Image (cartoon, rainbow, N blue to C red):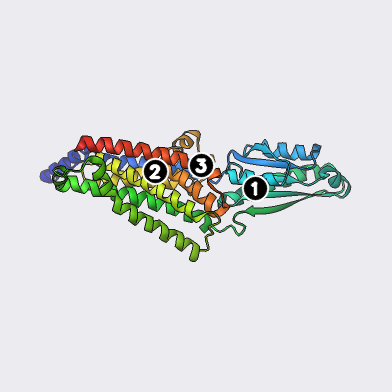
Amino acid sequence: MKRFISFVTKEFHHIFRDKRTLIILFGIPFAQVLLFGFVITNELKNVKIAVWDKSNDEVTKQITDKITSSGFFTLEEIIYKKEDLERVFKAGKIREVIIFEENFAQKLKKEKIANIQLIADASDANSANMIINYTSGIIMNYTSSINREINLPMQIHVNERMLYNEELRDVYMFVPGIMAMILMLVSAMMTSISVAREKETGTMEVILVSPLNPIQILLGKVTPYIVLSFLNAVTIIALGYFVFGMPIMGNLSLLMAETMLFIILALSLGILISTAAPSQQVAMFISMFALMLPTILLSGFIFPIENMPLILQYISALMPPKYFIIILKNIMLKGTGLAYIWKETAILTFMTIVFIALSAKKFKVRL
């Protein structure tokens, strides 16, 4: 028994001395509980909407105030013509447009019926469905409140329309998210493991005596993964299009160019991870922990970013997959061009340059 206790005590000492083991045992569960606790929610918060009020009367203003004061919606813009519908949705900020018909209050008073149209951006089908249901519920609540004060009941008909995904197919949401997650994990992880393996097995010394400079070595290491990752992306897009019916409404060349930009970003991030990882195991651990969870939880892949606490929204702004998913949805579902995704493209380009510069600098130091 004394030997057994001594052995167990020794194992405890080994665990407590190894910081990586402590992180795996305590850090990952702690981070997962916090992230899942804050991120996974079915509530709507701060959904940006636009209103097209053709009547502009007292009743429409009351309904608009009722919707915006609910705490779920934020009135971002007032629109005045049909052409503005496409503009606000393609810009990506507005999630729903509420349209009041002409002479709304007059029709409600005389004919006892009036119409409201709700148009939601269904490129994220789950969120669009929730947004429509919340808005319809608020309007029904308003209708019930005014009917209590009169003898003849009034009706407000709500016409719903899901833009870009009228059938609310989940695959339209998951294909861009899965593509971003796979490219980020595979590209970054395989590159980081590849370089770490060279250091771990000692073959890095062979590279040291070659006449190649650090940039050439980096390019030589990542070029095969650029080709393989691009083929991987093409396969995902082809499966989405031919098997699941995922549309490609925009320019295919632009889609491929944006995909290549993201692949290069992921590979440069993998090189950066490898410079800090002494072994393949550590490189894999960093890649999985630092990339997989944030990609799933904080990129807008599954859970809307506007539903998250403010601190997590700031952290999500540092996640490259967030911008790539926005780009994919805009090109594939909305058919937009570079004019609508230039900001996300610029952010990814800036991140890529930073990661490449840091990787080259750290790689040179390691050499």
Q: Amino acid at mark 2?
A: Gln
Q: Residues within 10 Å of mark 3 (few under 14, many from 20)?
A: few
Q: Amino acid at mark 3?
A: Trp
Residue 252 position in % (x across, y down): 49, 56
Left or right of residue 87: residue 155? right
Mark 2 or 1, which is nearer the eye?
1
**Residue corresponding to mark 1:** 86
Label 2: which residue? 32
Looking at the picture, which amino acid does disc 1 mark?
A: Glu
Tell me if mark 1 has few (under 14), some (14-19) or many (20+) residues whose alpha carbon lies within 10 angstroms of its own.
few
Mark 3, residue position = 342
**Residue visible at 54% across and 40% down in the picture:** 306
Would you say the residues marked 2 and 3 are in contact, meaning their CB atoms lie under 8 Å apart? no
Question: Percent from the top left, x then y, of residue 124?
Answer: 55, 51
Sooner in the amino-acid sequence: mark 3 or mark 1: 1
Instruction: Determine the secondary structure under disc 3.
Output: helix
Camera-nearest residue between 294 and 181: 181
Task: Give x and y (percent) for residue 160.
Answer: 69, 53
